[in-house]
């Protein structure tokens, strides 16, 4: 079921991308007045890239028609039902980190779909010292995180209400510190949940944010970070990011 839901989200993203690219009926004006970081993270996907150059990030991701945009407009856009389906926000640097925020980022979707997340992260890892990926989406109990250091994918993990769909590399000490190893179990034998079915242990949004804080920065606390006002960019995502099912060979 989760793959059907994620596929529907992916199709919506692609449809919105085509609409935006072919010409939306109205123009959106983004504020380019420098401002300080805004919090985000809940119900969202993002990259944390160790660089202070948003321009290099935009080029590496091959984003389309980037437009200067401050934090308030950018985060507002990626949480908007229409704009957020086809756009990502590339932030000004916060310390040594630049964020790429938006649900259109490729997601790990299991064996039935082409893996577009891992190649993207590895490619970015060849350009930047460290790249981190996080995804937290409670409506479908989907939580994921990954880390690339010095061009090598050292950890990647994703779990849904149907189980683990992405598990590469060894569990990191930061995950173990959060007791996340417990959540790799599908259920607890001999125990029943309130609904009478098998009890399934899953991470929560708070675990994702706490892990992000240990690896880089917790995005839900950025509004309290001391940082100079800045301007990032809002841009459309490449069509190549859309989800694709694995083609079966007859």
Image (cartoon, rainbow, N blue to C red):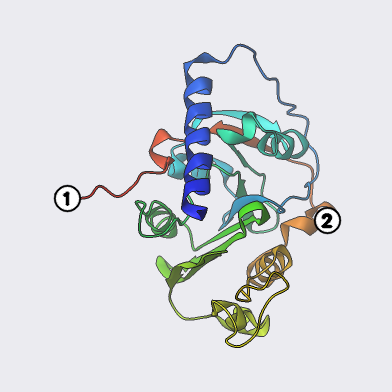
Mark 2 secondary-structure assignment:
loop
Q: Residue at x 45, y 55 (%)?
A: 109
User: Please, is residue 186 above or below residue 250 in the view?
Assistant: below
- Spatial separation of the CA atoms under disc 1 and disc 2: 54 Å
Give the image location of residue 75, x and y in percent: 72, 40
Q: Which mark is residue 213?
A: none
Q: Which dot, 1 or 2, sits closer to the camera?
A: 1
Give the image location of residue 205, x and y in percent: 70, 63
Residue 211 found in image quarter: bottom right
Give the image location of residue 159, x and y in percent: 54, 66
Residue that lies at the very extreme toward the bottom in this rendered image: 190
Residue that lies at the very extreme toward the top in this rendered image: 25
Q: How many marks?
A: 2
Label 1 with label 2: CB-CB less than 8 Å: no
Q: Nearer the viewer, residue 129 or 186?
A: 186
Give the image location of residue 179, x and y in percent: 66, 83
Q: Nearer the viewer, residue 192 or 107?
A: 192
Q: Nearer the viewer, residue 221 or 167?
A: 167
Mark 1 secondary-structure assignment:
loop
Residues packed near mark 2 inside 10 Å, few (<14), some (14 to 19) or many (20 plus): few
Mark found first going from the N terminus, 1 or 2:
2
User: Please, is residue 153 above or below residue 117 in the view?
Assistant: below
Residues packed near mark 1 inside 10 Å, few (<14), some (14 to 19) or many (20 plus): few
Q: Residue at x 62, y 79 (%)?
A: 180
Q: Residue at x 65, y 85 (%)?
A: 191
Q: Is residue 63 left or right of residue 98?
A: left
Q: Is residue 60 left or right of residue 193?
A: left
Q: Which mark is residue 226?
A: 2
Q: Is residue 8 left or right of residue 225?
A: left
Residue that lies at the very extreme toward the right in this rendered image: 224
Residue on which disc 1 sits: 249
């Amino acid at each position: 079921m989760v793959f059907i839901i994620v596929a529907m989200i992916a199709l919506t993203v692609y449809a919105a991308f085509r609409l935006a690219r072919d010409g939306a009926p109205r123009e959106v004006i983004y504020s380019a007045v420098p401002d300080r970081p805004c919090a985000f993270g809940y119900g969202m996907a993002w990259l944390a890239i160790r660089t202070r150059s948003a321009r290099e990030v935009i080029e590496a991701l091959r984003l389309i028609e980037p437009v200067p945009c401050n934090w308030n407009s950018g985060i507002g856009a990626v949480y908007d039902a229409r704009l957020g389906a086809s756009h990502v926000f590339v932030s000004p640097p916060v310390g040594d980190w630049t964020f790429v925020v938006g649900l259109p980022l490729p997601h790990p979707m299991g064996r039935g779909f082409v893996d577009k997340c891992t190649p993207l992260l590895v490619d970015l890892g060849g350009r930047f010292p460290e790249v981190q990926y996080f995804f937290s989406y409670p409506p479908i109990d989907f939580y994921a995180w990954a880390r690339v250091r010095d061009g090598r994918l050292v950890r990647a993990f994703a779990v849904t209400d149907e189980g683990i769909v992405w598990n590469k590399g060894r569990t990191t000490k930061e995950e173990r510190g959060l007791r996340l190893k417990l959540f790799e179990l599908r259920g607890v034998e001999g125990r029943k949940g309130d609904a009478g079915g098998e009890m399934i242990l899953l991470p929560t949004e708070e675990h994702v944010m706490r892990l992000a804080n240990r690896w880089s920065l917790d995005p839900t606390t950025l509004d309290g970070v001391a940082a100079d006002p800045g301007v990032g960019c809002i841009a459309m995502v490449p069509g190549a990011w859309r989800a694709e099912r694995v083609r079966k060979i007859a």
